[in-house]
Amino acid sequence: MEDWFDMRVDPAQIAKERAKARELRRTNWWRAQIQKGVCHYCGGKFPPSELTMDHIVPLSRGGHSTKGNIVPCCKACNNNKKYTMPVDEILAELDREDREREGAAPEFEVPDIPSPEVDVDIDIPDDPAQDV
């Protein structure tokens, strides 16, 4: 994924949010989250010790350390996700679908039939009743 976004988040804000995340790690809420043993992204089952704390909206992209923005995930998913957000994944999927659609043959294609280059001279009478 391309680094198209601007990552100008105040380092002091990131440090503050990391401190909040460390505090959340010590709460019963977080312990309950990792005791479930389920990665938020892949749905895989893991021992609690193998789950990491992930910010859905990364701190580097303006995310905060709140219960609504923090989920347990396996190390592989956390490493793959890096600094992306859900919208990045949705856009990447739409892009993949567009590329597949462009490369595939259309379901119905109108054939290219050249128009005949025949001069047709039709004599149309002024009074259609005379044509009988």
Image (cartoon, rainbow, N blue to C red):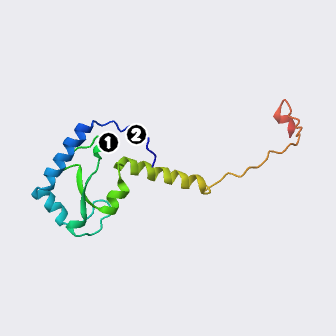
Residue 87: image x %, image y %? 37, 47
Q: Secondary structure at mark 1?
A: helix
What's the amino acid at mark 1? Arg
User: Where is mark 1, residue-wise?
Assistant: 61
The answer to whether 79 appears left or right of 17 in the picture is: right
The residue depicted at 60 percent of the width and 55 percent of the height is: 103
- The residue closer to the viewer here, 19 or 119, is 19
- Pointer 2 residue: 5
Quarter of the image that includes the C terminus: top right
Residue 85 drawn above or below residue 80? above
Q: Position of residue 71 (x, y in %)?
A: 23, 55
Q: How many marks?
A: 2
Q: Nearer the viewer, residue 105 or 107?
A: 105
**In screen coordinates, is 94 left or right of 117?**
left
**Direction top: furthest residue:** 126
Question: Which secondary structure lies at badge 2?
Answer: loop
Is mark 2 in CB contact (under 8 Å) with mark 1?
A: yes
| Residue 109: mark | none
Q: Is residue 68 left or right of residue 29?
A: right
- Toward the viewer: 127 or 25? 25
Residue 37 visible within the image: no
Q: Amino acid at mark 2?
A: Phe
Rate crowding at label 2 as few (under 14), some (14 to 19) or many (20 or more) other CA atoms within 10 Å: few
